[in-house]
Amino acid sequence: MGLMYRKSIPESHGLLLTPCNEIHTFGMRFDIDTITLSKENAVLFIDRAVKPRKVRKRVEGGYKVLELNSGMADKLAIAVGDVLEFLPADKISS
């Protein structure tokens, strides 16, 4: 169900969908940024401020989609071509 029917998520959280190369925002209650990644976590496409009730396009080479609060892609300075690293929560320093 992903983020459907939630009122919000904490700013520091996101949802990584894998394998995934196409999403929709039906049932969403807030805007999100979506970041399409390759298998190697290279950023292929960023779709900012996706409103509820939308279907997002398939991205060539896409294998994962990271969903974040609207505005977070810019706040984190994520750009096409970046390679993201994901760490288990217990490995993140505060």
Image (cartoon, rainbow, N blue to C red):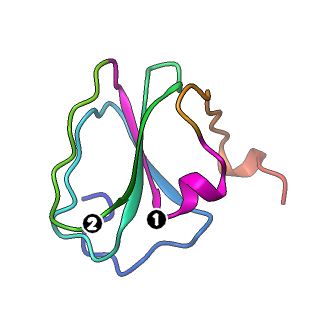
Residue 52 on image: x %, y %: 22, 68
Residue wearing tag 2: 51
Q: Is residue 35 left or right of residue 55?
A: right
Quadrant of the image occupied by residue 87: top right
Q: Is residue 61 above or below residue 45?
A: above
Q: Mark on residue 70?
A: 1
Which quadrant does the C terminus fall into?
bottom right
Q: Residues within 10 Å of mark 1 (few under 14, many from 20)?
A: some
Q: Nearer the viewer, residue 46 or 84?
A: 46
Q: Which residues are magenta?
A: 61-78
Q: Quadrant of residue 74?
A: bottom right
* Quadrant housing the N terminus: bottom left
Q: Amino acid at mark 1?
A: Ser
**What number is the disc on residue 4?**
none
Q: Work out whether 21 lies above or below 1.
A: above
Question: Relative to 49, does residue 73 appear above or below in the rendering?
Answer: above
Tell which of 31 and 1 is nearer to you. 31
Whether residues under marks 2 and 1 lie with C-beta atoms below 8 angstroms apart, the answer is no
- Residue 81: x, y in percent? 56, 25
- Amino acid under disc 2: Lys
Quote the CA–CA distance across marks 2 and 1. 9 Å
Q: Is residue 47 above or below residue 85?
A: below
Q: Position of residue 86 (x, y in %)?
A: 62, 38
Residue at 55% from the left image edge and 52% from the top image edge:
73
Q: Kindly state the secondary structure of the residue where label 2 is placed.
A: loop
Locate residue 32: give its quadrant: bottom left
